[in-house]
Image (cartoon, helix red, strand yellow):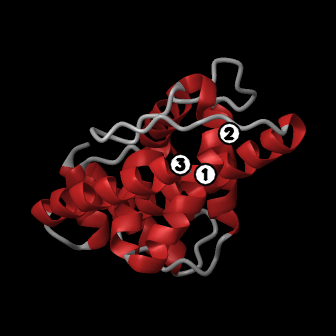
Amino acid sequence: MNDQAASEITTILKDWNSGDTAAGEKLLPFVYDELKRQARILMSRERPNHTLQPTALVHEAFMRLARKSDIEWQNRAHFYGISARLMRQILVDHARNHAAQKRGSNAIHFSSEDIDIPVEQRADSILIVDEVLGRLAAIDEQQASIVEMRFFGGLTNAEIAEALGISERTVVREWQSARLWLYRELNKT
């Protein structure tokens, strides 16, 4: 994304903050491709017969964003960070519904290289990851935000750093620490 487009997104977000209801419609063409990319990354980790598709995930997330009037948008990175959180919530809600229908439990296979859960087990496991991420947030909100943006939003270290107002080196360091903590927690279950 070029600097002009990033600046345009920030301007539209500020207009949205000011109460311009048409700003959401102006924003969508600028952010749709990136949101779709994030959704594809998330959905590629889901089971093959998942009923939620990337387009539906993007549309649901954007509809929820449009209904939230209490968000004070800071910039493009902040928008993508909030979008990642909403996509996480949508997937968790969907997984809860799926688990309620299925009522099965599968073991989680967690790689210390990343949060890597096999596709066939992800629907049930996403609930456990969400629960463990909630426990991490109680201990370290910043690390939980980094995991959420990386795992659920597919954001890069640079994008996470921008969204959180910290350095990329801090993101890398906090990610490594959070990853080890998550590995231990997930392997307890």
Image point (50%, 62%), residue name: 133
Q: Mark 3 — residue?
A: 28
Please tell me whether mark 3 sits on a helix, a strand or a loop: helix
Tell me residue 99's x, y (percent).
79, 41
> Label 2, on which residue?
124
Q: Is residue 41 above or below residue 181?
A: above
Q: Is residue 28 visible?
A: yes
Q: Which mark is residue 174?
A: none
The amino acid marked with disc number 1 is Ile
Q: Position of residue 73 (x, y in %)?
A: 45, 74
* Residue at position x 26%, y 57% in the image: 175
Image quadrant where residue 119 sits:
top right
Q: Helix, strand, or loop for circle 1? A: helix
- State the quadrant of the N terminus: top left
- Secondary structure at badge 2 equals helix
Which residue is more in the foreground, 31 or 148?
148
- Residue under numbered circle 1: 128
Compute the Cα span from label 1 to label 3. 32 Å
**Disc 1 or 3, which lies upstream in sequence?**
3
Q: Amino acid at mark 2?
A: Asp
Q: Residues within 10 Å of mark 2 (few under 14, many from 20)?
A: many
The disc labelled 3 sits on which kind of residue? Leu
Residue 159 position (above or below residue 161): above
Alpha carbon of mark 3 to alpha carbon of mark 2: how far? 32 Å
